[in-house]
Image (tube, grey):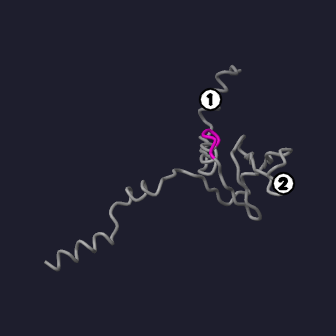
Amino acid sequence: MMEWPKLFERLVKNAPARQTNLLYRRLEEALQHGSNVWLETNSDSFSGVPIHLDREFVELLALSVPEDEEPESPSIPYRRTTWLIRLCSIEAVAYPTEHWSRERLEMLLGPTEEGDDESDDATMEN
């Protein structure tokens, strides 16, 4: 009879490697970084910060300020909603990857073509 540790080791070596899909990896990154995500299913949209993730579900926490309350009323300063969404029902996910100021974006894009056209016109006139 084979010993349990050796049997377990043998089963683990022969088991196929489970690769995670891209959706799961992106949700896992958002969970680790505390990033807000937007999820689309067949019938609804959800937004929030992942607070739990397993192979079947993601749990999103959404905080909001009630719009129907008067600003002077401090009785309900915010509203908390938790969504439990089955991963197989998610059709799309959006998540922020990087934010840039206008100046940073313009620097990344380089000189505009308009500026290049003006320099070409000046060269042609000479």
**For residue 77, side relative to residue 12 (left or right):** right
Q: Which residue is mark 2?
A: 69
Residue drawn at (60%, 36%) of the image: 14
Please tell me whether mark 2 sits on a helix, a strand or a loop: loop
**For residue 29, side relative to residue 40 (left or right):** left
Marks 2/1 in contact by CB < 8 Å: the verdict is no
Rendering coords of residue 90 (x, y %)? 70, 57
Is residue 32 highlighted in magenta? yes
**For residue 119, side relative to residue 52 (left or right):** left
Q: Is residue 5 above or below residue 60?
A: above
Q: Nearer the viewer, residue 70 or 83?
A: 70
Q: Is residue 100 above or below residue 42?
A: above
Quadrant of the snapshot with the C terminus: bottom left
Residue drawn at (65%, 32%) of the image: 11
Is residue 41 highlighted in magenta? no
What's the magenta region? 31-35
Residue drawn at (71%, 44%) of the image: 55
Q: Nearer the viewer, residue 7 or 48?
A: 48
Graded by Cα atoms within 10 Å as few (under 14), some (14 to 19) or many (20 or more), the crowding at tag 1 reads few
Q: Amino acid at mark 1?
A: Arg
User: Outermost residue, front direction?
Assistant: 72
| Label number found at residue 10 | 1
Mark 2 vs mark 1: in front: 2
